[in-house]
Image (spheres, rainbow, N blue to C red):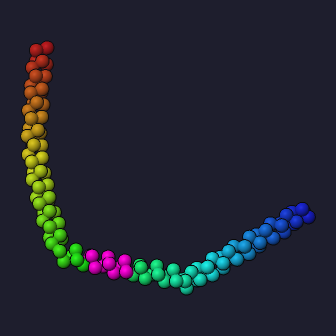
Amino acid sequence: MEKRDDLRDKVKQMADQAEKLIDEGFDKAKDSFDKAKESDTYAKISGLMEQVGGYVDKKIEELKQSDIPDQMENLRQKAESKSESIVDQAKAYGTIIVGDIEEVIDNMKEKLKGKEEKK
């Protein structure tokens, strides 16, 4: 039992040490991040990000005011109209094919009936 207790104590010590190291690492990382936020580089990057955001907003507004959205809507309507036409054509061809298939089946039935009657 004494060996088990020794082993248990060693595992607990190792776990405590690992927890202490993790806490120290986390604290150092947090301190580094806090210092970085106070740096000139962070301020410059933040300023650049604001400029980029402003530029993107401006370009989006320009796009909205241009005729591109209208052109895209016209293109969408033409594509929709064309696709409806293609679907209608496909339905018509399908009807023709179904009729042809039914005719072939009827012919096959007649031929098979003729063979059965001859026997």
At 32% across and 76% down in the image, what residue appears?
A: 56
At 37% across and 77% down in the image, what residue appears?
A: 52
Residue 109 appears in the picture as rendered: yes
Would you identify the image quadrant in which residue 13 lies? Answer: bottom right
9 relative to 93 in the view: left or right: right
Helix, strand or loop: magenta stretch: helix
21 relative to 106 in the view: left or right: right
Horizontal and vertical percent for residue 33?
58, 79
Magenta span contains residue 59: yes
Viewer-nearest residue: 107 or 96: 96
Magenta span contains residue 24: no
Viewer-nearest residue: 95 or 16: 16
110 relative to 55 in the view: left or right: left
Q: Which residues are magenta?
A: 51-60
Would you identify the image quadrant in which residue 108 lies? Answer: top left
Residue 73 appears in the picture as rendered: no
37 relative to 52 in the view: left or right: right
Specify the farthest residue to the bottom: 38
Horizontal and vertical percent for residue 80?
14, 59
At 12% across and 27% down in the image, what residue appears?
A: 109
At 28% across and 79% down in the image, what residue appears?
A: 58
Horizontal and vertical percent for residue 24?
70, 77
Q: Quadrant of the N terminus?
A: bottom right
Horizontal and vertical percent for residue 50?
39, 81
